[in-house]
Image: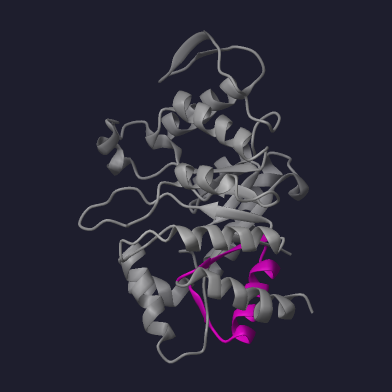
Amino acid sequence: MRFGLAIPQIFPDGAIDLEAIGACVREADDAGLDSLWVVESGVRSGRAAWSLEPLTLLSYVASMTTLARLGTSVLCSAFRNPVQLATDLASLDQLCAGRLIVGVGSGHPKRGHLFGLSPDHWTERFEEGLTVARKLWAPGTATFQGRFWDFEDLAMEPKPVQRPHPPLWFGARAPRGLRRAARMGSGWMGAGSSSYDEFVEQSRLLSEFLDEVERVDTEFEISKRVYLAIDDGADQESRVMSFFDHVYGNVELGRRCAVWGPPEHCAERIAALFEGGAQMVVINPMSDHRKQLELFRGSVLPLLKR
């Protein structure tokens, strides 16, 4: 039973709280949490997310921690040039002394035009980009000929600390994406916007796909992000719904997916996720990360460890 923490990253009021970021990651690292995570929100129509760029934020917190793994959950790698991305991630793995987990997703092809990309052959480009990164992370120079990229005798240094490369985890919901995770990755991240029932069904499908490629569970990690609010206050539900309205523009999604209420209820809901297939749960406070982390450590974690 392992736990990660989503780093404070989204600031709806527009005030970036560096003190909160630093305090949370240090406390989580000192407390022995397994990992610290960032998400990619990017630009969007209508209103800004007020979310810090994920790789920049991980670079910022790398020097503040020594034990916790640092991960992206997820990075929309299809929007990025894979040669530059491979270089960025290798440098980041160096800066955090080999603690990086690279969680990736394809992103929506309809947003590709914002990055000068065609939506055509989106999945193929996504997968080929990851192959390019792996080639560049391997020892020596790299030569590659693909549909979208080709190069010969390309040198990239420094390489990542981790060999053969940082763990590659996938975010996915649909069967095709889950099958890709089983084939190409070493982990899968259940979305915070997935309900318990959806997560259990996705875990079941993933197990089948791992069997298809003759991989055992010990070679593959399953995690689930949980939007959490430990509090029995009368206004907690309205705050949860406000969070989901800002992040997803969907209040009903909060009712289906978020976990909130007194410690006993939160512990029960989290325990069910481990029973449903999770090996690690990433807690994502929806407000006041420091207070929620303190409540989780003091009131929820002891119930889970009984």
- Range of the magenta residues? 258-286
Which residue in the rendered view is the most extreme toward the left?
46
Residue at left offset 47%, top offset 23%: 83
In percent of width and height, residue 276 lies at 66, 67
Residue that lies at the very extreme toward the front in this rendered image: 19
Image: 113 above or below 71: above
The answer to whether residue 8 of the structure is visible from this angle is no
Taking the magenta stretch, the answer to whether it contains residue 271 is: yes
Q: Is residue 300 left or right of residue 226?
A: right
Snapshot colouring: one colour
Left or right: residue 252 versus residue 19 is left
- Identified at 62% across, 38% down, the residue is 183
Residue closer to the observer: 209 or 100: 100
Question: Is 106 one of the magenta-colored residues?
Answer: no
Q: Position of residue 211 (x, y in %)?
A: 71, 45
Residue at horizontal 26%, vertical 38%? 114
Question: Which quadrant is the C terminus positioned in?
Answer: bottom right
Q: Nearer the viewer, residue 75 or 175?
A: 75
Q: Quadrant of the N terminus?
A: bottom right
In the image, residue 31 sits, relative to residue 233, either above or below, namely above
Residue 269, image quadrant: bottom right
Q: Is residue 73 visible?
A: yes
**Residue 149 x %, y %:** 43, 18
Residue 289: give x, y in percent of width and height: 51, 69
Q: Is residue 114 left or right of residue 289?
A: left
Q: How many marks?
A: 0
Residue 6, above or below 235? above
Looking at the image, the residue that sits furthest to the top is 153
Instruction: Please name the residue shown 47% across and 11% down the image.
Output: 151
